[in-house]
Image (cartoon, grey):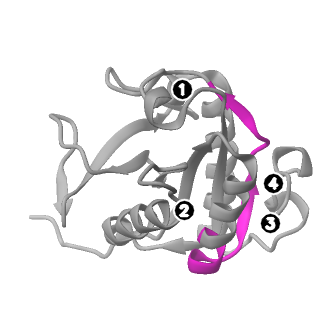
Amino acid sequence: MSDPQPPEAVKMIASLFSGDECLLGDAIQALSERYGRTDFISAPAPFTCTDYYDREFGGSMIRRFVAFERLIRPETLPDVKIWTNALETRLSAEGRRRVNIDPGYLAKAHLILATGKGYTHRPYLREGIYADLTLIYRDKSFHPLPWTYPDYAGGEVIGMLTRIRERYLLQLKGKAAGSGPAALRASDSDGDF
């Protein structure tokens, strides 16, 4: 028999994309006001891995990843997704989303994204939100699964998430102080908005 224990805190992350880089900044600012200071913001990069969103957003989208200093409880992921959905609605215009926000969390063993779309590998959480097991961590790296979106399976994103995970492990040990070896290198982040 297993003895139930509370789960470890996890590191909240989000992927955001938009055709308007200023809107990305506004969304990151709103996320920071809600979930605390960011400790990683990726450089802007073209979001070209799929044409799924072209009709809604048009072409030429920019993407950024963010991670948050304050750790969260994993069971709060549906609350985060519901709040980010509301933020997307607040930032929309003329009935169209102008920014997409995909929140999730890093744990020691995996990357989980929140989604409103159920599927075979997505267990239901609550309030219409499912957990998408996107990457697993083994042999000192994240690894994609057969259903992992191609952009998350790429070496650049896996390397970035591995560096974020290293900081997360230091946070769990109580050693991350925002400077020195515990902090992400300045080249890994453009800083806070």
Which portion, as a residue range, is magenta? Answer: 31-47
**Could you give the CA–CA distance between mark 1 and mark 3, rounded to whole angstroms?**
25 Å
Residue 84 drawn in magenta:
no
Which element is circle 1 on? helix
| Residue at the image position 64 percent from the left and 23 percent from the top | 155
| Residue at the image position 41 percent from the left and 68 percent from the top | 86
Q: Which of the 4 quarters of the picture holds residue 119?
A: top left
**Could you give the CA–CA distance between mark 4 and mark 1, rounded to whole angstroms?**
22 Å
| Residue designated by label 4 | 184
* Front position among marks 1 and 2: 2
Earlier sequence position, callout 1 versus callout 3: 1
Which residue is the extreme one toward the left? 1
Total marks shown come to: 4
| Residue designated by label 3 | 193
| Residue designated by label 1 | 151
* Front position among marks 2 and 4: 2
Earlier sequence position, callout 3 versus callout 2: 2
Which element is circle 4 on? loop
